[in-house]
Image (cartoon, grey):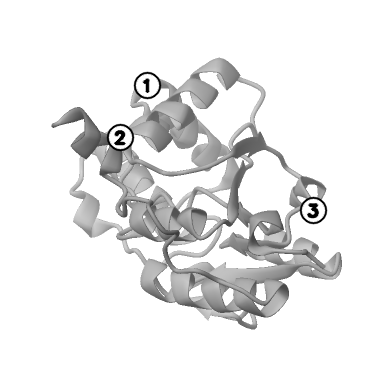
């Protein structure tokens, strides 16, 4: 049990939670097949079988996306993610980004640098950045996650997990958030329940993910 909101560590996944991997990957697949990305359904299962991909073809196209098209640097952010995480951070929540992007044995330097560039460009606040496959090792008080196998593993270890809604995880029990407005509300309530306090905005702290730009006069 944490002693105060400043001790509450939130483990935040990237792909499918903060970053729109499905849309970014659809652009890669569509470009390789020379078809419109709109032809690819967004109602996908975890392995993208609906797009006619087997594991080998998925890994090939994923590699093209990451190494040739810098997918991890350029993919769109989920609506409202930066402002929601800034409000949680301003309230004292420790944001720990946890991602398994080093799933392959190639391109680690590029993946790490493009990930950091993306976080900075999209004004995502964080105090730790962890590249981990085994997410229970991250030692967070709660997690927000989309991958069914990660949710199952974390919950099996006694962890609290908020499921970020995606087509491939709708058979999982809640708590669940369909967007970052819901996620922020669910997480704020969870922090308040665990710590006994949740201040929506710390006194004297300028609100908004674009605060750095405003300070620079841009």
Residue that label 2 marks: 32
**Mark earlier in primary sequence (1, 2):** 2
Neighbourhood count class around disc 3 (C-alpha, 10 Å): few under 14, some 14–19, many 20 upward: some
Mark closer to the observer (2, 3): 3
Residue 50 located left or right of residue 158: left
Q: Is residue 6 visible?
A: yes
Measured as percent of width and height from the top left, residue 153 is found at 79, 62
Neighbourhood count class around disc 2 (C-alpha, 10 Å): few under 14, some 14–19, many 20 upward: few
Residue that label 3 marks: 136
- Measure the alpha-carbon separation of dots 3 and 1: 32 Å
**Marks 3 and 1 close (CB-CB < 8 Å):** no
Measured as percent of width and height from the top left, residue 43 is found at 39, 69
- Residue at the spot x=34%, y=56% of the render? 83
Position above or below: 31 against 140: above
- Residue at the spot x=71%, y=39% of the render? 132
When asked about the image quadrant of residue 194, the answer is bottom right
- Measure the alpha-carbon separation of dots 2 and 3: 36 Å
Q: Secondary structure at mark 1?
A: helix
Instruction: Name the quarter where the N terminus is drawn.
Output: bottom right
**Marks 2 and 3 close (CB-CB < 8 Å):** no
Q: Secondary structure at mark 3?
A: helix
Instruction: Name the quarter where the C terminus is drawn.
Output: top left
Q: Is residue 16 visible?
A: no
Position above or below: 15 against 167: above
Residue 68's disc number: 1
Viewer-proximal residue, 155 or 57? 155
- Residue at the spot x=38%, y=32% of the render? 120
When asked about the image quadrant of residue 161, the answer is bottom right
């Amino acid at each position: 049990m944490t002693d105060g909101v400043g001790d509450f560590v939130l483990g935040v996944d990237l792909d499918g939670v903060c970053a729109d991997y499905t849309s970014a990957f659809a652009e890669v697949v569509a470009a390789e097949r020379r078809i419109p990305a709109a032809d690819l359904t967004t109602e996908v299962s975890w392995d993208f079988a609906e797009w006619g991909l087997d594991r080998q073809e998925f890994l090939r196209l994923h590699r093209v996306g990451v190494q040739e098209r810098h997918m991890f640097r350029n993919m769109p952010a989920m609506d409202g993610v930066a402002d929601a995480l800034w409000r949680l951070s301003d309230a004292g929540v420790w944001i720990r980004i946890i991602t398994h992007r080093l799933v392959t044995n190639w391109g680690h330097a590029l993946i790490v640098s493009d990930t950091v560039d993306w976080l900075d460009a999209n004004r995502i606040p964080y105090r730790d950045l962890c590249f981990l496959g085994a997410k229970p090792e991250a030692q967070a008080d709660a997690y927000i996650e989309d991958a069914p196998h990660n949710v199952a593993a974390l919950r099996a270890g006694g962890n609290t997990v908020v499921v970020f809604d995606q087509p491939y995880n709708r058979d999982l029990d809640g708590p669940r958030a369909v967007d970052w407005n819901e996620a922020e509300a669910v997480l704020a309530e969870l922090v308040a329940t665990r710590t006994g306090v949740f201040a929506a905005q710390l006194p004297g702290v300028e609100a908004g993910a674009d605060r750095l730009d405003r300070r620079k006069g841009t």
